[in-house]
Image (tube, rainbow, N blue to C red):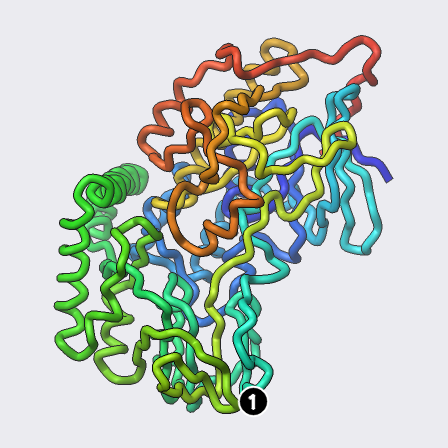
Amino acid sequence: MEKHIDILIVGAGISGIGLAVHLSKHCPQRQFDIIERRESFGGTWDFFKYPGIRSDSDMSTFGFNFKPWQKANVLADGASIKGYLLEVLDEYKLKEKIHFQHRVLAANYDSTQKKWLVEIEDANQKKQTWIANFVLGCTGYYNYDQGFQPNFPNQQAFKGQLIHPQFWPADLQYAGKKVVIIGSGATAITLVPALAKGGAEHVTMLQRSPTYIASVPSIDFIYDKMRKVLPEDLAYKLTRARNIGMQRGIYALAQKQPKLLRKLLLKSIEMQLKGKVDMKHFTPSYNPWDQRLCVVPDGDLFKILRSGQASIETDQIEQFTEKGILLKSGQHLDADIIVSATGLEIQILGGIKATIDGKPMDTSKHMLYQGIMVSDVPNMAMIIGYINASWTLKVDIAAEYICRLINYMDKNGYDEVIAQGDQTELMEDTVMGSLSSGYIARAADVMPKQGKHAPWNVTNNYLADRKVLKNARFDDGVLKFEKRTKQSLPKPKLVS
């Protein structure tokens, strides 16, 4: 079966939904379809089911620029975020555009037709070929099929349950049980208070090294008061601008005065621990923002640790035992359940096997033009959010840029655009920057690379990107535009 479409959006999560709205608003002459391999929309916020799952960005910047987040809570749980996305789908009538349980297997760009031939497996496991003018990747950067799971020494000896948060069992009974969580990132610090409050006998967080953790208020009282006296859109814009400024300010302070920020963060933690927990567990060896800064609402993690319902150990694993984990120090952690919150397996474009005229495309050998378009790959863009700010901030400005580019092509009668790469610009760092986090280090063989100069360097600076993308010209000598030749196939009729 063949189906001719105009623009194919791969993924119905935050990025895909946001991009679809911008296309419907700014490119009404274009038609688009969204394919989603899962049974429902929401991506991360539909997939992860572990207790306490929530955003680690404030919702005034995690919400889209076209739709205010209308609640006062600063961080939102997964169900609330999915509810917000459902409102977007309803408001912009996007549900009928989404083809659920459709998985992209492969995509080949045919340079004679100037079109993508996309092999798709539908809900009935039948293969279809969709022919698209543009392919826009909105799949995030992790593998839904597997998380990063180290092979622990003597792992098979453990008689309890070993689970990964990415595949949290719906029927897991942890009340009254001893739980050890391996990890120190956003997932681990979310799970500790959630499981303790959910009735676990005791929760232990086991980390190899500490992470910087900042406490943020759970309710934005200023935003809440502004919404009562100002129009909703204005209150949202003002709060959003304030929080963007704060994010940039903290990140800039980390770059320019890391010792000062370190001192401030550690002092804040010390005040919340009140001498009940050793500060060695919260004193990293690296500078702030060498790895991602984690946040907790109202210091919930510190409260649980102070209460004694949970504890934290900084050590290395010697081996698993029948009843838990033996540490290098000789200490034994008893466990009925071990949660391996060890991170994500990095994957680009949802694992699509992409080729150009039959030649395989290795994304790790490419760069991103303006942080959006894959170098030397025709009619393709992808959205990768920020590592130091809300993912959605990048979605909005990248989507607006893509719409401007498509409108420019339509105005000039172009069918193909290629961002011509320059190998002398290629660096070893990926577009995710130089953070030392494990999942970023593991991305080196998958993610597109950083470039030395604009338009190939990815700054992870929202304010700078917003200005650049809004004013970027398309006749810059890097973008190469083409029209179909007379020998090419006629433009197919578009099907919604």
Asked whether residue 180 is in view, the answer is yes
Q: Nearer the viewer, residue 10 or 430?
A: 430
Q: Nearer the viewer, residue 487 or 149?
A: 149
- Single out the residue that lies furthest toward the right: 1
- Determine the residue positioned at 60% across, 62% down: 146
x, y percent for residue 473: 46, 14
Task: Give the answer, above or below, for where 156 lies relative to 429.
Answer: below
Task: Give the answer, above or below, for where 33 lies relative to 80.
Answer: above
Q: Which residue is mark 1?
A: 159
- Determine the residue positioned at 50% across, 36% down: 449
- Determine the residue positioned at 31% across, 61% down: 211
Q: Quadrant of residue 185?
A: bottom left
Quadrant where the C terminus lies?
A: top right
Tell me if 314 is positioned left or right of 299 in this view: right
Q: Quadrant of residue 147?
A: bottom right
Question: What SS does tag 1 mark?
Answer: loop
Asked whether residue 239 is in view, the answer is no
Tell me if 283 is positioned left or right of 358 in this view: left
Tell me if 116 is positioned left or right of 436 in this view: right
Q: Nearer the viewer, residue 217 or 288?
A: 288
Task: Give the answer, above or below, for where 57 lies relative to 482.
Answer: below
x, y percent for residue 343: 48, 61
x, y percent for residue 435: 38, 47
x, y percent for residue 215: 23, 61
- Determine the residue positioned at 39% across, 87% down: 332
Residue type of the residue flagged with mark 1: Lys
Task: Give the answer, above or below, for where 11 lies relative to 147.
Answer: above
